[in-house]
Image (cartoon, rainbow, N blue to C red):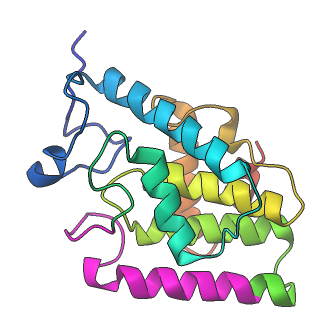
């Protein structure tokens, strides 16, 4: 069965521009599963880094550094905000401002107990993925950040449907549906999915 590296019909990842595709670092990668494996190894290393000491998740620089550590061995653009338009997310010129506003909002939520800890972490994760600050990896980043923030707030990490959402079929469909509900101001499905 074919496993094209950059299949435009693959809805598991935001399509990359030709220029962004040229920024792939490992020369051996020619198939999608090879890319997924390389990214997963890199994400594991980033998780170990993030958990190695106490870090403030609600920091704009931390978010960029975490993305760089998650994808920096695979993509040259890792950790750098996207400069191109997408079919999802804010306009590229708004990214830095919107991420800064999100961080400020979340700091306020935590300080004032606006939401319970799980809801604070899920809302932060949802807003981050809605901004879609990076060329790719935004969903994986936002879920990891949600986990880290939940832990920072004294809660266990989320299960996010108990599977990788890259090739998870029905689980991914439920996740995307929960994101759409959150886009329409109904956070409950995403809260339920996060702990499913």
In this rendering, the answer to whether 120 lies above or below 143 is: below
Residue nearer the viewer, 19 or 46: 46
Determine if the magenta segment contains residue 158: no
Residue nearer the viewer, 173 or 49: 49
Residue nearer the viewer, 48 or 43: 48
Query: Where the C terminus falls, by quadrant?
Result: top right
- Magenta span: 81-108
Q: Residue furthest left?
A: 18
Residue shown at the point (19%, 40%) measured from the top left: 8
Total marks placed: 0
Q: Quadrant of residue 31?
A: top left
Q: Position of residue 152 (x, y in %)?
A: 81, 64
Please say whether residue 151 is visible from this viewpoint: yes
Q: Give the dominant element type of the magenta stretch: helix, strand or loop.
A: helix
Q: Position of residue 9 (x, y in %)?
A: 23, 38
In this rendering, the answer to whether 13 lies above or below 117 is: above
Residue shown at the point (25%, 31%) measured from the top left: 26
Q: Quadrant of residue 78?
A: bottom left
Q: Residue furthest right?
A: 154
Q: Position of residue 154 (x, y in %)?
A: 90, 61
In this rendering, the answer to whether 123 lies above or below 164 is: below
Please say whether residue 114 is visible from this viewpoint: no
Residue shown at the point (78%, 60%) measured from the top left: 150
Q: Position of residue 52 (x, y in %)?
A: 72, 49
Image-based side of 78 in relation to 26, left or right: right
Query: Where the N terminus falls, by quadrant?
Result: top left
Q: Residue furthest front?
A: 53
Residue shown at the point (42%, 25%) measured from the top left: 37
Q: Residue furthest top?
A: 1
């Amino acid at each position: 069965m074919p496993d094209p590296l950059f299949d435009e019909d693959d809805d598991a990842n935001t399509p990359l521009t030709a220029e962004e595709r040229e920024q792939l670092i490992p020369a051996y990668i020619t198939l999608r599963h090879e890319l997924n494996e390389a990214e997963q190894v890199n994400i594991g290393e980033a998780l170990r880094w993030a958990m190695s000491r106490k870090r403030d998740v609600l920091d704009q620089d931390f978010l960029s550094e975490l993305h760089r550590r998650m994808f920096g061995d695979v993509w040259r653009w890792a950790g750098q905000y996207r400069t191109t338009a997408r079919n999802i997310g804010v306009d590229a010129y708004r990214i830095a401002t919107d991420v800064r506003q999100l961080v400020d909002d979340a700091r306020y939520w935590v300080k004032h107990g606006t939401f319970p800890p799980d809801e604070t972490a899920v809302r932060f994760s949802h807003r981050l993925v809605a901004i879609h600050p990076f060329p790719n990896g935004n969903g994986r980043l936002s879920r990891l950040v949600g986990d880290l923030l939940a832990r920072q707030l004294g809660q266990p990490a989320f299960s996010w449907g108990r599977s990788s959402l890259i090739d998870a079929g029905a689980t991914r469909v439920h996740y995307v549906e929960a994101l759409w509900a959150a886009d329409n101001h109904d956070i409950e499905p995403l809260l339920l999915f996060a702990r499913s």
